[in-house]
Image (cartoon, grey):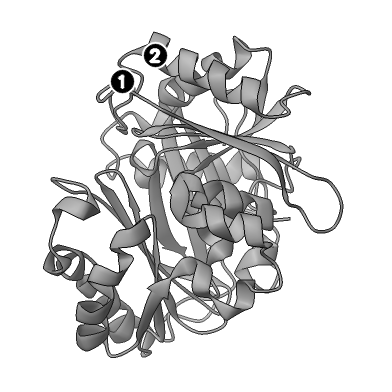
Amino acid sequence: MSSRATARTASVSPGIFARFRRWLNQPPAPHLVCEFSAEGVSAARTAGGGRRAFESHAFEPLPEGALVPSPVDLNLVEAGAVAGALGRVLSRVNAHGTEVALIIPDQAVRVFLLQFEAFPRRAEEAVPLLRFRLRKSVPFDSEDSCVSYSIQPAGPPGAAAGTVHILAAIAQRRIIRQYEDLLEARQKRAAVVISSTLAALPLVDDRRPTLLARQAGNTWTTLIASNGALAVYRCTQMPAAADSLAAQSLLDEIYPAAAYFQDTWNESVAEVRLAGFGAHAEEFRAPLEAELKCSVSPVVASAALEERLAGEARAQVDLRMDALVGWMLAD
């Protein structure tokens, strides 16, 4: 996704990890990644080779209200403060080169799971179709937007034979352009643009139905991945951050997603992973386990990540770095 170009179609291949990188038609994999959030600006430089790891990383907090994620309004309320934070994190990492993987807040991007009886193979035909389909579902002009999409390998068991299942993301071009402008002022170019939770998706073990509950400031995002497909995606703006809300608030947010998945996919969630809750994760674990009847643990505890995630990177997952670590694992 980029304000300068429209994303192209994805190839169908097994496993949500394998398909992740193909979502933007196999985009370049910059070794410099930068994330903007309401809390601050993060950057990391990853090493080359088959097993990517952080060479360096940094986080710079933002004044409250300097960046306000929104799908409608410009996000950078105090652009100077955000630009200053970006400059400071780039000075603390090995920021040579021009290409950057740009991660933006979930609230700036709308994500949809769609079904079509037939779907064009060419992006030149598919993107206008998606814009038309989404025109009444987004609170902005879909014609002036950036669209990315992926063909999912499977849908719910009851779906009609031949139905094409699409994961689509759409954002206002002018909002993405705000973030790109910050990078370009530092002689950087956004080679890839993706929302925060989708960047963190490779942290999820999708070999059995897994629910990811992710907290970033006041934004809670819930998704369920199973057997290479994204089955549920839900993003909600909460009245406060996780450390100010009771466990029941999280349960009220994720239970409808779990119930929908069970009713639609005829399966139950096998495990729940928490991201972004830090030291507060334990406060939510027992109530969620009692209600959902499955194990609940921080996303970094996934056995599937033990061999893929080095000690230093593991330590960063719950320190505002889960999206950057997820991007690192996407290769």
Name the quadrant of the N terminus. Answer: top right
Residue 164: image location, x then y, percent: 53, 67
126 or 47: nearer the viewer: 47
Residue at x 33%, y 20% (from the top left corner):
74
Rounded to the nearest angstrom, the CA distance separating label 2 from label 1 is: 7 Å
Do callouts 2 and 1 mark residues in contact (Cβ within 8 Å)? Answer: yes
Residue 236 in the figure: left or right of residue 78: left
Residue at x 14%, y 56% (from the top left corner):
245
Q: Is residue 82 above or below residue 207?
A: above
Q: Which of marks 2 and 1 is nearer the N terminus?
A: 1
Residue 292 in the figure: left or right of residue 157: left
The amino acid marked with disc number 1 is Ala
Residue at x 48%, y 76% (from the top left corner):
155
288 or 155: nearer the viewer: 288
Residue 289: image location, x then y, percent: 27, 84
Task: Tell me the residue that label 1 is attached to.
Answer: 66
The amino acid marked with disc number 2 is Ala
Residue at x 56%, y 66% (from the top left corner):
152
Q: Quadrant of residue 221?
A: bottom left
Task: Tell me the residue that label 2 is attached to.
Answer: 81
